[in-house]
Image (cartoon, grey):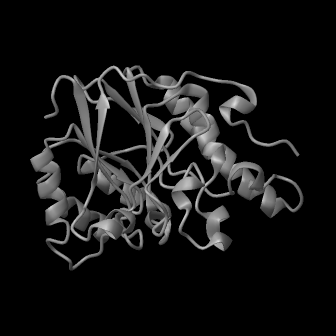
Amino acid sequence: MATDEKIRLAAVGDLHCRTGRHGHFRKLVDDANAAEVDALVLCGDLTDHGLPDEAKALLDELSRVRAPIVGVLGNHDLESGKGEEVCSILREGGIHLLDGDHWEPKGRAVGFAGTKGFAGGFDRASLQGFGEEVIKAFVYETVREALKLEAALLRVDAPVKVVITHYAPVRATCVGENPEILPFLGSSRLADSIDLYGAAVILHGHAHYGSEEGRTLTGIPVYNVASPVLRKADPERRMRLVELDRVAEQPQPAVGEEAGAPPAG
């Protein structure tokens, strides 16, 4: 495991596991074990079509990981309408899946808060809940996911807080994607909630053609760990290694516009 001075995490998203691809994640498992990480973090789209057999295949692939595994679901995991079954399979297999809740591994000084997140756009280009009922419902889903994150962060007692989402909380880690789809890749409302309560780092996926790094308004580092992004610079790269101080100096809670409050209007 990591040294007394550091918490070491392996993070990756968008595995898109399918059946019939045995051994596809062998290098990921070997690299995570070799790094002696405190946890393997999975940032959604764990399966390709949200099928129970894909979830079972993923468990088989990750069965050799020595560290505990924590993560969230993504939009692909809900594609077939079997999200609850997929979630149950993965949880029964030992993966700590978060959906507006938290998990703190014993003796590791770190706590994880996570939720899938949702879309809606970033900063002053965020979609507002005005007009047709379907638009209001869309925005409400984003707000609901942000509130779930707030509730999860409030429950973390560990000195180091790590946030896991699938959708992006900042625009910076989506740069490289077609501008037309940016509003569908995430929402800064997620970052607003995290800025209110502080965290050491935010890990997400979803934006396959995005950028690796960004920051929230209060300076919290954000890492896009979607598998295609990780392999962009190095085809052999299967995870991002994140090292955190065990007593992290985390941004303090803020209020108003300095905390990234949603724009008025």
At x 75%, y 41%, the residue is 262
- Horizontal and vertical percent position of residue 151: 56, 30
Q: Is residue 111 above or below residue 17?
A: above
- Horizontal and vertical percent position of residue 213: 46, 51
Front-lying residue, 138 or 55: 138
Quarter of the figure that contains the N terminus: top left
- Horizontal and vertical percent position of residue 31: 15, 55
Q: How many marks?
A: 0
At x 59%, y 32%, the residue is 218
> In this view of the protein, can residue 56 be seen by the observer?
yes
Left or right of 111 on screen, residue 30: left
Q: Is residue 244 above or below residue 180?
A: above
Left or right of 208 on screen, residue 125: right
At x 85%, y 42%, the residue is 264
Q: Is residue 116 above or below residue 221?
A: below
At x 43%, y 25%, the residue is 156
Q: Residue furthest bottom?
A: 20
